[in-house]
Image (spheres, rainbow, N blue to C red):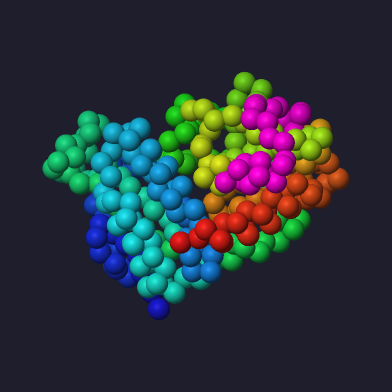
């Protein structure tokens, strides 16, 4: 059975889905996206993703294509039509397709936004990578300054993934002015003497939905949290390290630039946070 996707108000077989060659997401990366996890056929932290989408659209002066309520129903309908038990739903909004290529934004009254969603079926609740931990390299962060907006401009993070793969590792942490900003598709953390340390929110990093939830759960569990920048050297000397994202939840990091972190195995804080996140998120899933 063909996967069913959503394109501008229609549910279509993926082979039939089309957008214009003049769509600004294709021509200018003029778009934003969100990825919502699905566990047990339910959406994880949908409200958080919907709120961040609204913020991203507002920062780019882009018209929202549908209401939050309509967006929730589209997500649920895709879960139903694709019989999705576990995996992810990818959502992308672009500024639409004008009559021709032009750097100037089109009039939103005349050119509606493009809205595309599709499902990705995969096991995400159980992970051999989470059991073993991942290994990362460090790379220079040369992205644009508004990383807090979740845009589809993902070429450099993709290149970072490939740099890590070429080095025989799993991912890359980006570094700017001597401090770690974030991973290629995740927020970065270290643990030292029982304190969870992660970079403070600003325009320099994505305001992760999973990040927010994990830090809230950590505080509720009486874990100490410190939001500040840290260096690669400090991370290598940490007791633990991990990353968070919507698709990997809490993922331990066991090696940075060929240096083992802590014991070289996933630590207790990361493992416990992963357990808590999965348990609590399922309780609130929609």
In this orientation, does residue 86 appear? yes
Q: Relative to 159, does residue 175 appear above or below in the rendering? A: above
Q: Residue at x 33, y 62 (%)?
A: 73
Left or right of 189: which side holds 151?
left
Percent x, y for residue 77? 35, 67
Quarter of the image that includes the N terminus: bottom left
Given residues 12 and 168, the one toward you in this image is 12
Task: Give the image quarter of residue 60.
Answer: top left
Percent x, y for residue 200? 59, 29
In the image, residue 89 lies in the stretch drawn in magenta: no
Percent x, y for residue 246? 54, 51
Q: Residue at x 32, y 70 (%)?
A: 13
Q: Residue furthest left?
A: 110
In this orientation, does residue 138 appear? no
Q: Relative to 67, does residue 191 appear above or below in the rendering? A: above
Over which residues does the magenta segment extend? Answer: 213-235
Q: Residue at x 40, y 44 (%)?
A: 51
Q: Residue at x 75, y 47 (%)?
A: 269
Q: Residue furthest bottom?
A: 1
Given residues 169 and 190, the one toward you in this image is 190
Q: Relative to 207, does residue 115 appear above or below in the rendering? A: below
In the image, residue 230 lies in the stretch drawn in magenta: yes
Q: Residue furthest top?
A: 177
Task: Give the image quarter of residue 70.
Answer: bottom left
Left or right of 253: which side holds 53?
left
Percent x, y for residue 23? 26, 46
């Amino acid at each position: 059975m063909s996967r069913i996707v959503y394109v501008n108000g229609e549910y279509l077989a993926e082979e039939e889905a089309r957008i214009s060659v003049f769509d600004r997401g294709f021509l200018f990366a003029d778009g934003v996206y969100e990825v919502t996890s699905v566990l047990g056929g339910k959406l994880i932290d949908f409200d958080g993703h919907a709120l961040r989408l609204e913020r991203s659209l507002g920062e780019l002066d882009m018209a929202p294509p549908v209401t939050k309520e309509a967006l929730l129903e589209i997500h649920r309908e895709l879960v139903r039509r694709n019989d999705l038990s576990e995996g992810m739903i990818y959502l992308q909004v672009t500024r639409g397709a004008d009559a021709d290529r032009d750097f100037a934004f089109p009039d939103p009254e005349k050119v509606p936004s493009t809205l595309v969603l599709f499902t990705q079926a995969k096991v995400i609740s159980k992970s051999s990578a989470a059991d073993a931990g991942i290994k990362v390299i460090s790379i220079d962060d040369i992205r644009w300054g508004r990383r807090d907006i979740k845009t589809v401009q993902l070429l450099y993070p993709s290149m970072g993934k490939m740099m890590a793969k070429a080095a025989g590792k799993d991912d890359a942490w980006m570094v700017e002015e001597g401090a770690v900003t974030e991973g290629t598709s995740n927020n970065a953390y270290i643990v030292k003497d029982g304190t969870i340390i992660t970079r403070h929110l600003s325009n320099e990093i994505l305001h992760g939905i999973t990040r927010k939830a994990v830090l809230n759960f950590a505080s509720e569990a009486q874990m100490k949290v410190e939001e500040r920048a840290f260096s690669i050297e400090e991370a290598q000397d940490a007791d633990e390290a991990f990353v968070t994202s919507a698709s990997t939840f809490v993922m331990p990091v066991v090696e940075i630039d060929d240096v083992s972190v802590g014991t070289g195995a996933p630590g207790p804080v990361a493992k416990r946070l992963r357990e808590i996140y999965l348990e609590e998120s399922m309780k609130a899933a929609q």
